[in-house]
Image (cartoon, helix red, strand yellow):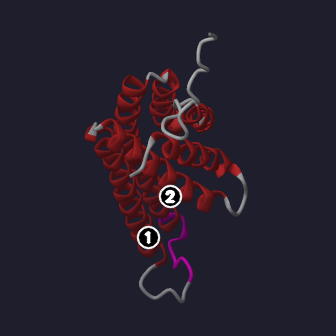
Amino acid sequence: MPDLNQARMIGGIGSILLVLTIVPNVGPVLSIVGFILVLLALKYVSDTVQQPAIFQNALYAVIIGIVGAVIAMVLGGAALFAAVGPGFGGGFGDGVSGDFFSLLAGVVVALVVVWIFAVVSAFFLRKSLYLTSDVLGVKLFRTGGLLLFLGAILTIILVGFILSLVAYVLLAVAFFQIPQTGGQPPPPPPPPPP
């Protein structure tokens, strides 16, 4: 059965991988692995403290994020297809400026959709982290959840990316502050002197 020690290690490593999202080329892969590890750690915490809402809210956050990304890809692909045209052979066609602006509008709509879904996803992740903070007594989960939520809101003006990175660092520290449980019991005290 998973315990808080496993949650501490898995969540801490996952949060560190989320910080490494900014690394070129491998950042997106590290981000996905990091999110999976953090989700698994929250599942362990949820099971250990018998608070299913912790994992449920985190799972809602992940599902909403995935749905938002898929919808944005479909919208972006549709905008590209509409701008290029069904032939794909003639470039942008005769009305280059009109096609460019329709492509630009489609990309903007896709980005707005991603932003909306990211804010809703961050809201549920914040709820999960607030519950984790309340149950475990580690206040950095609450701070990290708030910064992730604010980061998602402010991503539209690019400040949010910095807030999100700070939140991931705080989450790593928060996971490593989870109290250790289990393991070897301490040795018994020595007998009193005669």
In the rendered image, which quarter is residue 47 located in? top left
Q: Position of residue 67 (x, y in %)?
A: 34, 58
In the image shown, does 155 or 63 lie closer to the viewer?
A: 63
Q: Is residue 171 above or below residue 38?
A: above
Magenta stretch secondary structure, dominant: loop
Q: Amino acid at mark 2?
A: Leu
Residue visible at 36% across and 36% down in the picture: 128
Q: Position of residue 111 (x, y in %)?
A: 46, 51
Residue visible at 53% across and 41% down in the picture: 183
Task: Tell whether position 145 is magenta.
Answer: no
Residue visible at 52% across and 25% down in the picture: 140
Q: Which residue is mark 2?
A: 104
Residue visible at 46% across and 31% down in the picture: 145
Mark 1, Cα crowd under 10 Å, few <14 / some 14-19 / many 20+, is some
Numbered tag placed on residue 77 in the rendering: 1
Q: Which residue is outermost to the front? A: 194
Q: Nearer the viewer, mark 2 or mark 1?
A: 1
Q: Position of residue 177 (x, y in %)?
A: 57, 29
Describe the element under mark 2 as helix, strand or loop: helix
Q: Which residue is outermost to the right? A: 24
Sequence-wise first label, 2 or 1: 1
Q: CA distance from mark 2 to mark 1?
A: 12 Å
Find the magenta span and give its range: 91-98
Describe the element under mark 1 as helix, strand or loop: helix
Q: Give left or right: position of 177 versus 64.
A: right
In the image shown, does 144 or 153 lie closer to the viewer?
A: 144
Q: Position of residue 179 (x, y in %)?
A: 52, 29
